[in-house]
Image (cartoon, grey):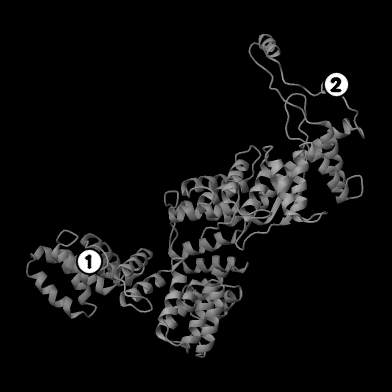
Amino acid sequence: MRSFIVSGCLFKVYIIFAVIVFSGSFSSLLLAETFEFQNAAEDEQITESAEAIEAVEEQAAGYEGEFQNVAAEDPVAESLPAVSPESAGVKLPKTKEEIQIELEETGGYVVPDVIPPNPEMLRLTAEGIMYYRGKGVAKDYTKAEALFLKAAELDGAAAQYTLGYMYQTGQGVAQDLNRAMEYYKAAAEQDYSLPQYSYAHMLYYGQGVEENHAEAAYWYLKAAEQEDSLPVHYYSVGVMYDNGEGFSRDLEKAAQWYEQAAEENYGQAQHNLADMFYTGDGVPQDHQEALKWYRRAEVQGFVQSQFSIGMLYFNGEAGLPRDFGKAMGWYLKAAQKDFPPALYCIGYLYEKGYGVAPNQSEALLWYQKAADAGDGKSMYRIAMMYLNGSMGMEKDEQKAVAVCYKALALGSTEAAFGLGVMFENGEGGISRDYVKAVDLYRQAADVGYFKALSRLGVLYDNGLGVARDLTEAAKWHEKAAIKGSVYSQNRFGGMCYNGIGVERDFAKAFKWFEAAAKNGNVHAQYNLSLLYFNGHGVERNDIQAYAWMTLVAVQGEEIASQQRRIVKSRMTPQQLIEAEILFNRLYQEVLL
């Protein structure tokens, strides 16, 4: 599952001191220092890769040496007298006459007009750095702040950016998010990627200002388009396109930005890109390409990718053989970092005996570990054990309900559904309450939980907890069918066939009866055979009708045996042979 959080929980800020890259005789005066701080972000976040951090720190170290060398050769005086721009060495813009003369002298080439940095701003910034870092003087944030404030007034971008960081984090000053925003914005408007990213970050999370995703998207994109942009900048733009925040949702553009960050070894982007290749969102579906990116993220220790590789082995996808033992190995690797889905899956493998000997006590141990780590799905499973007295647990309905509510508080869709079932059926010591059941099913349905979608369809079918509304029932059954509910696939197929809650549509009926039939629903299999027999929604085909009716008959449905005799009466010997061959294939594919 993709992560949709813009920044990381441990984010590295690269504070740039001095003026950035001038041509001609002006040296690139860069000095960088790295600080770690905790961003006020959401729950599910990421950390930059060690390789990416190391690369930037090496670059920063190079900049520091360059600044120190220049400073040693050309020390800045304590104060500067008021002088004209010309005497201070500040170049003024060329006149038209000067440009024409230069064109004639150089054969058509004009040296770019570059305005040099303000010497006073450089001096103030350099002194601020000394106090900020404690280099050659005692570290003193108060003096550093005062110097940076003066440099910021002279449009020193590095000073503005550093002040933004100090006010954002309360480093050596009283925390003031409004002032942080002010200085980040001032530096961002000078077209540097790091303050642009920091400004966007505060806009996104509403720090010092109301949340503004549109404005945040603008500045994230500005940062990502700079020459000195970092992989996290590309990733953040990808998230905005992925979520449809600030931009219209565009999965193709999201994939492009993720790939740009992924190519520079940004783990979260690699994982998100892998997810997109797995599902075919924004890129052609390609499970082997997904595996490639999962492996690249996993090498960095990205736990979600470790778990995803385990799932590929569990399902036998991406060219990998189905191998429960290898799946277990990857789950255990992710479990070392207490990744709840991995803990749950280990419990499931022990419960079912997949790749290991069945062991209920071991399964319960892992389910409990996942529950302790805050996994609502595991809590729900444990609640069902209490409710049914299974897996060696003593039946305890009150405890089952209590655990379900605890899981619900953590956002478990399974728990919302489970409690809905209890209220619908009057289980667990709960009085039957269809209205409460509807409310709980809606909570689970809001995040697409197919069982809840299907139950809402049933309740609208029967007018339980809601006014009977077959149009509304059809809507919920269709949603559930799309999500894979076999019951709703058959039910919605029947509604399409008979025109209940929707316009009559034999082709749609055929589509959903076939889906449910291939998923093992015996009623859908019989309905499908009748469509083939009558030529409704599909060309009449006695071979298909006979084969599907035979499949239904071997499951004990007598009506199918009777109907099969009618179909047989109009078939040739060759058609019967073909029907038997088709039946054997369907039996292998559907029933086994």
Identify the residue at image location x=63%, y=13%.
108
Q: Nearer the viewer, residue 199 or 365?
A: 199
Is 452 drawn above or below residue 122 in the view shown? Answer: below
Q: Is mark 1 in CB contact (under 8 Å) with mark 2?
A: no
Residue 164 tag number: none
Q: Quadrant of residue 101?
A: top right
Query: Is residue 62 found left or right of 505 in the rendered image?
Result: right
As helix, strand or loop, the secondary structure at mark 2 comes to: loop
Report how many numbered discs are placed on residues in the image.
2
Q: Position of residue 78 (x, y in %)?
A: 92, 35
Identify the residue at image location x=50%, y=90%.
395
Is 98 drawn above or below residue 581 in the view shown? Answer: above
Identify the residue at image location x=78%, y=51%.
166
Kindly identify which residue carries mark 1.
499
Residue 402 can be seen, yes or no: yes
Rounded to the nearest whole Å, what is the CA distance between mark 1 and mark 2?
89 Å
In the displayed orientation, state which residue is furthest to the front. 467
Q: Amino acid at mark 1?
A: Gly
Query: Is residue 258 found left or right of 100 in the rendered image?
Result: left
Residue 589 can be seen, yes or no: no
> Which is nearer the N-term, disc 1 or disc 2?
2
Kindly identify which residue carries mark 2.
87
Q: Amino acid at mark 2?
A: Ser
Q: Position of residue 7 (x, y in %)?
A: 63, 54
Q: Nearer the viewer, residue 233 or 587?
A: 233
